[in-house]
Image (cartoon, rainbow, N blue to C red):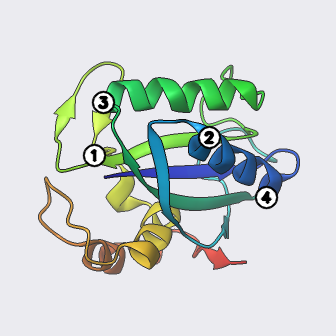
């Protein structure tokens, strides 16, 4: 079981997320089990003047390895015209593998669990919605507990 974070702040954000979910589901080795509601959030970092993000989290069952899943996610991003020129820049779609089974590993290409997920309300709120009892394998706290630890410094996500 894996969790994938989805985000978009360019174009038709809802359509972009829907298209990414459909592309995941269309991949033979992936089954989208559950998807959170969409949450609207302010951008964190990056250039000034970016639009708000829509974010969601999908729980998927897959026979792929984590690295193969990453390549599928990048292929989907590319198919939806994701541009990577500006760090934390606006994007049509962003797919991040947040967690993959109970794996903990780090390579130059992929870190699992995602190293900042537990600090980001726009990740933890939708994750806690669909999997409140999921336990972070490195921190040994569940999604609900991790969400409660996030301070008020980050703008709250708005369920839309």
Residue closer to the observer: 21 or 129: 21
Q: Could you tell which of marks 2 and 1 lies nearer the N-terminus?
A: 2
Q: Could you tell which of marks 3 and 1 lies nearer the N-terminus?
A: 3
Q: Alpha carbon of mark 2 to alpha carbon of mark 1: how far?
A: 25 Å
Q: Alpha carbon of mark 4 to alpha carbon of mark 2: how far?
A: 18 Å
Residue 54's quadrant in the figure? bottom right
- The residue at 73%/26% (across/down) is 79
Which label lies toward us, 4 or 2?
A: 2
The residue that mark 4 highlights is 14
Residue closer to the observer: 52 or 34: 34
Q: Could you tell which of marks 3 and 4 lies nearer the N-terminus?
A: 4
The residue that mark 3 highlights is 65
Which label lies toward us, 2 or 3?
A: 2
- The x and y percentages for residue 33 are 46, 61
Q: Residues within 10 Å of mark 2 (few under 14, many from 20)?
A: few
15 over 35 or under it: above or below:
above
| Helix, strand or loop for disc 2 | helix
Residue 43's quadrant in the figure? bottom right
Q: Residues within 10 Å of mark 3 (few under 14, many from 20)?
A: few
Q: Could you tell which of marks 2 and 3 lies nearer the N-terminus?
A: 2
Q: Could you tell which of marks 4 and 1 lies nearer the N-terminus?
A: 4
| Helix, strand or loop for disc 3 | loop
The residue that mark 2 highlights is 26
- The residue at 29%/34% (across/down) is 111
- The residue at 68%/61% (across/down) is 42
Q: Residues within 10 Å of mark 4 (few under 14, many from 20)?
A: some
Q: Could you tell which of marks 4 and 2 lies nearer the N-terminus?
A: 4
| Helix, strand or loop for disc 1 | loop
79 over 119 or under it: above or below:
above
- The x and y percentages for residue 143 are 30, 72
């Amino acid at each position: 079981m894996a969790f994938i974070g989805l985000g978009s702040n360019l174009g038709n954000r809802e359509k972009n997320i829907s298209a990414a979910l459909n592309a995941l589901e269309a991949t033979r080795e992936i089954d989208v089990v559950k998807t959170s509601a969409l949450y609207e959030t302010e951008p964190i970092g990056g250039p000034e003047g970016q639009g708000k993000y829509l974010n969601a989290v999908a729980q998927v069952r897959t026979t792929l390895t984590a690295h193969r899943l990453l390549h599928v996610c990048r292929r989907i991003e590319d198919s939806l015209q994701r541009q990577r020129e500006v760090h934390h820049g606006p994007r049509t779609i962003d797919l991040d593998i947040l967690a993959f089974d109970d794996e903990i590993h780090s390579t130059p290409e992929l870190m699992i669990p995602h190293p900042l997920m537990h600090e980001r309300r726009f990740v933890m709120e939708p994750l806690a919605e669909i999997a409140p009892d999921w336990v972070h394998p490195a921190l040994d706290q569940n999604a609900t507990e991790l969400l409660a630890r996030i301070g008020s410094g980050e703008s709250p996500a708005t369920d839309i």
